[in-house]
Image (cartoon, rainbow, N blue to C red):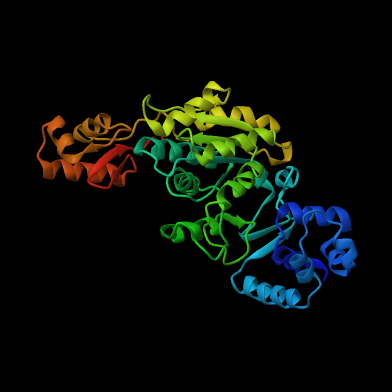
Amino acid sequence: MEGELGWLALSLAPGIGYKTFHRLLGRFGSPGQVFTSRRSELKEIPGLKKKTIDAIKSSALRETAQKEMIRLRSLGIQIIQWGTEKYPNYLSNISDPPPLLYLKGTLLPEDERAVAVVGSRQASAYGLSVCQKICKELAWHGWTVVSGMARGIDSAAHRGALEGGGRTLAVWGTGLDVVYPTENLALSQEIAASGAILSEFPLGTPPEPGNFPVRNRIISGLSLGVTVVEATVRSGSLITARMALDQGRQVFAVPGPIGRPTVEGSHRLIKEGAKLVESAEDIIEDLLPMVDRKLHREIKTLPIGEEPELNEKERQLWELLGMDPLHIDAIARAVDLALAETAEILLNLEIKGLIKQLPGTFFVREFYG
């Protein structure tokens, strides 16, 4: 079996992980050569079990791969083989690149100008707001944001990039037909339309816990640097940061309020040498010299520092709000206004994109400009 079908078939063989796949490529040169090899040659490969050899030598694997290829095409999913022109350049050079990537959406040359942004699934309103701000700024400056589409910071990273009109890539720990978490279905569709979703796992792969640390090497491998926004000391985001260092990537971390468990991991990274980040510019100034000149583009600028046009009462409420959520009752008391009038002013500020309502009628300021 040659071409895409051979790559797909070998990846679907039982007992073939990315390490064994590369071991076979190193010995035989291509999946096609693996399938035409003798059993005695396959037995010489360390760790290759009898059931795997039997599968490689059977006709059933070809039939399975053919059916899978039809299904992939019906879902609009491509497969990209390691070593081909379409394969992401930075990812191809890590020590353990996935032999096969499933892709929905598009990869562009400018996606090499990428930053990974990861963090806690149980993020605070502060962390979510800062994350979206930074990722929106990155998008405005023409950088692709890479993350894992998990709850919390990952989802905020993708949304920030989309709000900035930029590109974003989501790396899944499931098959591309298994949306996880399920509430991110609409977000996954937006990402595929404005970038890509990728996975090394075949269709039907469920969200097993062991998949996510494995996929983290792809998140960091696609990027020039990894930014951690809110992470506990046991967070998977720290695994991504360690992988980034192993891959020679830059590591950045966003500080947070002292005493919150969700920032202890981020602060530890800063103590260990990660660059402290307060804005997208802190990331870009370190990474821009690493970008191929042909991928440079004119820098867009956010209207940072511009004063919003507000009436007296709107400005009073807007200046009261910060990154810590305030309940509408507390806001009304602080500005000495009736609850109904306060709600109306808050709605006007939300329409103008200056504040955001959280569940339970809590409000925070949007730090986008």
- Report which quarter residue 124 is drawn in: top left
State which quarter of the image contains the N terminus: bottom right
For residue 363, say whether it is visible: yes
Please say whether residue 276 is visible from this viewpoint.
no
Left or right of 352? Residue 119 is right
Residue 217 location, x and y as percent?
64, 44
Judged left or right of residue 309, residue 25 is right
Which residue occupies the foreground of this view, 147 or 205?
Answer: 205
Question: Where 110 sits versus 84, above or below?
Answer: above
Quarter of image, res 50: bottom right
Query: What residue sits 50% from the left and 58% below the top?
Result: 188
Residue 158, position as x, y percentages in the image: 49, 48
Q: Is residue 240 above or below residue 215?
A: above
Q: Quadrant of residue 243?
A: top right
Q: Which residue is nearer to you in this view: 359 or 107?
A: 359
| Picture quarter with the C terminus | top left
Residue 64 in the figure: left or right of residue 178: right
* Residue 282 coordinates in the image, percent (x, y): 54, 27
Rendered location of residue 320, percent (x, y): 24, 30
